[in-house]
Amino acid sequence: MDILSDTLEVLRTGRPMVTRTDAHAPWALKFQPVSGAGFHVVVEGRCHLLPPHGEPLALGPGDIVFLRRGSGHTLCDVPDRDPVDFVPERVDRSSPIGQVTVDGPGPRTVLVCGAYAIDVDRPHPLFGDLPEVIHLPAVPGRHPVLRSAVDQLCAEFHAPQPGSDAVVTALIDLLLLYILRSWYAEAPTERTRGWTAALTDPAVAPALKAIHDDPGRPWTVESLGARAGLSRAAFARRFASVVGEPPLTYLTNWRMATAARLLHHSPAPLSTVAQHAGYTSEFAFAKAFKRHFGSPPGAYRKQARTAGGGLQKDPRTTGTTGAHP
């Protein structure tokens, strides 16, 4: 199993949304905080990103920024503008594609703004390892696959065709993977430890794969260490040093994340969810789940249905679409 793909699939709560923003100066758009992650691609022109903390970030044609927490921020032509709320217009509520237009006499900036629905109640080291803002400047010859995906996305916006909604959704998913890959490739110092480093660590990666392939198996530190050919003590030290937490802590967190996804997205009985999470007793599972999330599995599932209008939670029905792409 591809660990990165598996992790993103478990953490997502709905399909991504994207908005084409066409702004003529003067302009400033305020993006409210949302439960998820977001990105912006500068297709044409220039602008500034005003993050929650830190100095304004100047962006040019082809630049990409990724915000791992969906933090509130502002995009503007110059930093001293008074912003208005970013509110996409959607002709069809079922479409993941929106439009924002700002009229003005000044220079034009065209942006592609996207949002990924990520459940913040299921934290994972993948996003914990990332900086708050990732900036990938446009450099000729760098990240050709990422640039190709961006070009295809822009082409769908400029000339929509039958099936564009599905194509755009797939491309946005690809962008997330390509953005992460590109950052990994350019940030070797940040990857000396942490979950991303573990993906290629010869001792830790086999254990992670085993956990992701079969989270319900009664794993022990010894059995996981055997996958790497290390003793129990040596493996425990290596795993904690690279990932930042002990192996059984990661195992428990991952079991809870996969259980939460099952409760969120499927009608499986609690006994099945408990078994998938490595518990033979529903009572023991419910106790562990409540300790982890603050509510028992049944209440968690009910809250998911209420928030998402059903088992399949969709960000379009959670009240966030007006605040973020």
Image (tube, rainbow, N blue to C red):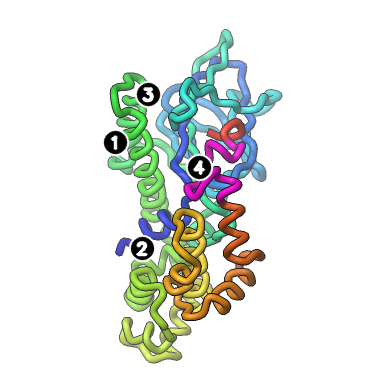
The residue that appears at 33% across and 28% down in the rendered structure is 164
Range covered by the magenta-colored residues: 305-320
Residue 59 drawn at (x, y percent): 50, 32
Name the amino acid type tagged 4.
Answer: Asp
| Mark number displayed over residue 148 | 1
**Nearer-N-terminus badge (4/2):** 2
| Mark number displayed over residue 3 | 2
The residue that appears at 38% across and 43% down in the rendered structure is 173
Q: Which residue is mark 3?
A: 157
**Nearer-N-terminus badge (2/3):** 2
Crowd rating for badge 2 (residues with CA inside 10 Å; few <14, some 14–19, many 20+)? some
Name the amino acid type tagged 1.
Answer: Ser
**Nearer-N-terminus badge (4/1):** 1
Q: Nearer the viewer, mark 4 or mark 1?
A: 4
Under circle 3, the secondary element is helix
Q: Nearer the viewer, mark 4 or mark 2?
A: 4
Q: Is residue 133 visible?
A: no
